[in-house]
Image (cartoon, grey):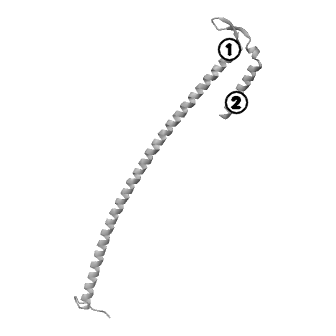
Amino acid sequence: MRTLGALGILVLGLLAAFVIANWHVLAMPVEVSLLVATIQAPAGIILLGGTALLLVLLAAYTLSLHTSTLLESRRHAKELREQRLLADQAEASRFTELSSAMHKEFADLRVELQKVSNESSNSLAAAIGEVEDKLDRALGTPGEQRVVQ
């Protein structure tokens, strides 16, 4: 893009040098046809004015195109920010849901673990009680506490 701009400036400079060097020829009045009538006017000045008008129109078109591109780019950037915000909120919501589901699952697991632990301790206590009863019957002293030396 910079090369194209530099080339445009170079061409305009060369055109200006050509106009300055040949001003006396460009300003010379000649017979010019306007398709309906013929007048005496400097044809070079008319062509130079037409070129200048075309250059102004081209610059206005380029400026309007650049402005609309910038506006469209800003609109897209705004939409992207809004979509990113929505995605971030959805992700945060999913993390919150996942966290609450994990807390519930851990609470359920803890309750289940306590239940299994109580059952195991009750089962172990019952087994120990049976072993004590069998020892007491085997030693022949029911209900007495013997001290084994």
Quadrant in the rendering for residue 100: bottom left
Q: Which residue is mark 2?
A: 7
| Marker count (numbered) | 2
Q: What residue lies at 54% left-to-right and 34% top-to-bottom?
A: 70
Q: What residue lies at 43% left-to-right and 44% top-to-bottom?
A: 86
Q: Amino acid at mark 1?
A: Ile
Q: Position of residue 8 (x, y in %)?
A: 68, 28
Above or below — where is 44 with respect to 145? Answer: above
Q: Amino acid at mark 2?
A: Leu
Quadrant in the rendering for residue 15: top right
63 relative to 139 in the view: left or right: right
Residue with the most extreme top position: 37
Above or below — where is 91 with respect to 132? Answer: above
Q: Position of residue 84 (x, y in %)?
A: 47, 44
Specify which label sits upstream in the sequence, 2 or 1: 2
Q: Which mark is residue 46?
A: 1
For label 2, the crowd category at 10 Å Cα-Cα, with few meaning under 14, some 14 to 19 and many 20 or more, is few
Q: Position of residue 44 (x, y in %)?
A: 71, 15
Q: What residue lies at 72% left-to-right and 28% top-to-bottom?
A: 10
Q: Which mark is residue 119?
A: none
112 relative to 57 in the view: left or right: left
**Local secondary structure at mark 2:** helix
Q: Nearer the viewer, residue 56 or 4?
A: 56
Q: Position of residue 81 (x, y in %)?
A: 48, 42
